[in-house]
Amino acid sequence: MLRDDSSDDEINAVEPGQSESSSICRSLAQILEEGQNVTGAFSYMRTHPVAPNPGLHVNGLGTLGLPLSLREAAAIKACAQFAASSSTPEDASASGRHCWEISANNVRFENGGWTAFIDDTIRQVCQAFAVDYKTSAPRSVLSKLALCEPGFSSPASVVHTSGSGAIATVVVVLPSKFTGGEIRLAHGDREEIYDCSSDSLANTTVLAWFGDCTREIQPLTEGFQLTLHYELLHTNEVTPPSLFDQDQTVSRLRDLFSTWNSEKGTTDTPRKVVYLLKDKYTRDQLAHASLSGTDARHVSLLNNVGKLHEFRVGLATLVCTERGAGELQREYYGDEDWIEGANDVTMVEVDDREIEIIRLVSLDGRLICTSLEHDLKREGIPTRMIKLITSERPDKQMYAYQNSEHMSYKRVFYRTVAVLWPQWAEFELVHGPGGFLDACKRLRACNTAQPTAEDAELVEAILARTEPSTSDAVMSSVCKVALMWGDLPLWLRTVKACNAERYISAMEEKNIHRAVSAFGFQPLQECLQQALQRDPSDVDTLQFLEDFRDWVSEQESSELSAIVVPWIAARRKERIDGLKGPAEVEYEALVELVLQHGDPEELERKVLPYIISSASDLVIVKCVELLSGERCNSVTVGACTRMIGELLTTVSSKVDYRPLLNSLQVLDNEDRLELLQLYIKGCVVAKRNDLLSDVWPRLKDFAGLSNSEISSHTEYTLFPLISDVAEAASDVYASEVSSLIETTVSHWLDTLGTPDVPKLAENMVLVMLEAISASKQTSLLDTRIIPKFEAEANDKQLRLLLDGLRASRSILGPIPDTVTLSLLKKWFATTQQPLNSTEAVAYIVSFDMPEACSLLFQPLLNPPVLDKSYVQTQLAILLRSICSSLATHKLSAKSPNFAPTLRAIMRHWTEKVMVPRPTEEAFRPLTALADWKCSCKHCKAARDFLLHTSEEVWTGRIGKQNRDHVVAHLGKHARFAADWKALQSRGNGEPHGVEVRKDGRIADALQWSRNRLIGLELLKAISQDEAELQTVLEEDYPTILASLQEPNAPASTASTVPRAQTVRVAQTVTAPGMLPDVYMFCEPKPQGAPSRSGEQRGVRQGDAIAGPPAKRRKTTYDEKDVIDISY
């Protein structure tokens, strides 16, 4: 079952990403709409195990018994021959000596039930051929009785209907025992083959075909076949239906099925189509025979044409369940409040929708699966299927009241759908999206020595649906059971089905080893050889041969070794002589495999020439690196020198010494830079002075380069190159490397800060420092780099150098503090960043240098003007920044690097911010406001205005009852804090209200209280431990703490601030070693907080102080109250 919470429009919309699926559904819907009177059938067959005895009477012979006996067959032959001699009967058979016919004039039926049977048969034939029974008013006319004996046959020929208005031929095969005589009927490229011989002794079979079909009858091999031939006549003046009328529809449908099959495997191609039938049918008896009208014709059309393209059609029931809020369209209340008109409940709002497709059956009613996953957005016809279904009356509905106003409503719709799917999607359709892999898993779990019928069927289903994406799962499952069952043909067939011969690794080495153990090597030799030849990878094939040789030797079988080892040697030589793999990817593994095999000459004569001829220059120089390492110990020095020399000479003329002249080229030319690096490194390691004599001058050549190009060239090429080469270079090349780094640094510094050069980046500084370290030229820092930065660098460049020096300490060694302090002092002077910010302080703290902290803090503590504003806006921020940095770096506030600064800031806060101290009288209004406890939104708005805003006037248009409620609280709690007046309602609809004007005398008290809370917050930021706080503040501790004490309040009040901001100072110390709980800090409400006015639900009249309206209690839902109104 799938849950669908989408709206109707969403459910039925055609989305852009579903173009292929939507196209198929739209085309199919159009074909079915235009072909409502088409079934696609040109022939018909139905076997009746129970049919009436016609009471067949032949003139001159009497009544014949059925099933037909040999004696009566002989009598019919004699009668027909006698009739022929008197020119009464007609011998019109295709092989006259084996078939006799008696005209209808000499035949009658003595059982009245036979006429009813024939009439019902004609109706069924008309339905199969989409002949409108009412319009055409068809009539069946018996034309002859025919008897055929062994030897009778009829070649393929077009059989034309006889008589005016004839639509089709209907043949009734009466009970008689015979074999053979299959009938092939064809129209165009469609054909049907019918065999009536099965249980022919007891059954009555009806065959029918349109006129102008091709008919062919196979030889009758045994027994007699007795048939009645009828012509189906069209009796209306309207043009009779014909095959031509439906050929166009059939052709369009076939094209659609062909397109659908051709798009197999694409994500947009639907796995099925769900088609909503017009009528509803009983789900427990669902079958094609139970359908009627257009539904029956459409299903016949899909089935008749679909089977030509391996499509199947089934029938299922769609269940749509909706839950939500409902309402009664009509209510009748009697004395007992019972409700009539229950069928008039409507869905007001859908909260939840569930859509199931259940019990998919074949057209003959056999169960295929109990439930079906679906995506009606992509697979449904019509596109607005759910909206169409839910617009009709539900099949089942229930409702229950949750309270007096809300109704819970559930309704269920049952509809019949036809499901159409291609054969290639059937496994997934029946078993679900993961069904294929589950089947493979189930097969892997099989442990029987012989396959059961179910196992064999599962194997065939898996192999028939194998795709490249599932081949690994198929190989691991089917090959396993093939080995277990000793079934070599199945193992080989699985390899073919999975195309595992395309490369050797697809067969898996363990699978090959087990197969050789189970079936021997020779039956598998051809398969393995083909895989080795097809495999595009030289490395995979050579590695397999090496591993296979090792496995064979482990088996300790001289017989197996005698066969396999020469075969491995031949295959290896064959591959080495014809290398074809991607050298760009496999060069390293290929060289190692050849060296591992122990044949250096093979490497020099075969492998390296192949790499040189087919690989890039970068791969060639990478091979130099391989041959220079320890892996080449098995190669003689002379051979190694020759191969390296050949590789270097091959690429020497192709090396670009200026690969990266601007930052945009970096990603595109990384290979060229790597080629340059590996080439020079290879020359250094190989001591190729003849090649290096040209390298050093070209690296130091900056002629013709702009400042921007020099900057990029040094950053992306020279500095990384120097770091790489310097590590490999011996003392022989020390002077060349030193000269190169000095030249590079000099040119780089000359471009620093010039307008057309990109901004200095962190990576640039790091690669530069790494280069001077690798080249052992750190003296350049003191002589060139640091002086240049101190003289000309901006704050960002200085910080990048500082960070780079600190990050490179492991390779540069310790940097003198004087250098760091000098650069920091320069940074202080140039930075645009506030020095009291958390980032700036954290940056200085990270250096762990007291002198650096002093450089930062002293100017901030001694400004030209130290007043209240400076303390609040600068020093308070500095304190928070210091404390945050200390917490980040896990440092103590007691550190002498920070304690004096923290103490000075708190002393300035006490002296500049907390004076003058308001009198107790100034706090009296605040004391009274603290007792205002009402939490309704109107009281809260008025209280917030008085305590947390700088506004002088607040107006609330809140309605008369709410106004009276607020005014009552103002009179009780705000007499010393504000004045107020009542506002009357206005003619424009504005309700009653209140205007409150704040007393300006409470502003100072409020501001002092806020500053006090901030001061307490600053203390807590330093430390919450009393002992540590006393250590930091030293002799200033008592003075600072006393300045932050709350003013004495009358005993009747608990606080002078609102409840949310209560500060409790009961005593100086509440517990040994702990700072008193002086506050629970809450940020004051922002200045200018918006006030609200407006109406609220009415409250009861007569309340002196009306509280907020009571919330309506939700009625408990009781399942016993559910009313089932199903019908």
Image (cartoon, rainbow, N blue to C red):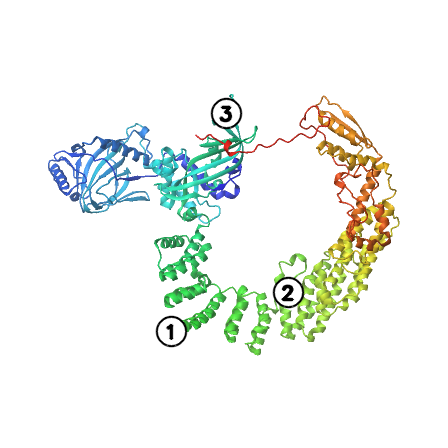
Q: Nearer the viewer, residue 810 or 439?
A: 439
Q: Which residue is mark 3?
A: 339
Give residue 481's position: percent from left, percent from top. 39, 59
* Helix, strand or loop at mark 2: loop
- Horizontal side, residue 13 vs residue 1066: left or right: left
* Helix, strand or loop at mark 3: loop
Q: CA distance from mark 2 to mark 1?
A: 58 Å
The answer to whether one can see residue 933 in this image is: yes
Viewport quadrant of the C terminus:
top left
Precedes in sequence: disc 2 or disc 1: 1
Give residue 339's position: percent from left, percent from top. 50, 25
**Residue 287 image-quadrant placement:** top left
Precedes in sequence: disc 1 or disc 3: 3
Instruction: Give the label on residue 559, or none.
Output: 1
Q: Which residue is mark 2?
A: 656
Q: Amino acid at mark 2?
A: Asp
Q: CA distance from mark 1 to mark 3?
A: 94 Å
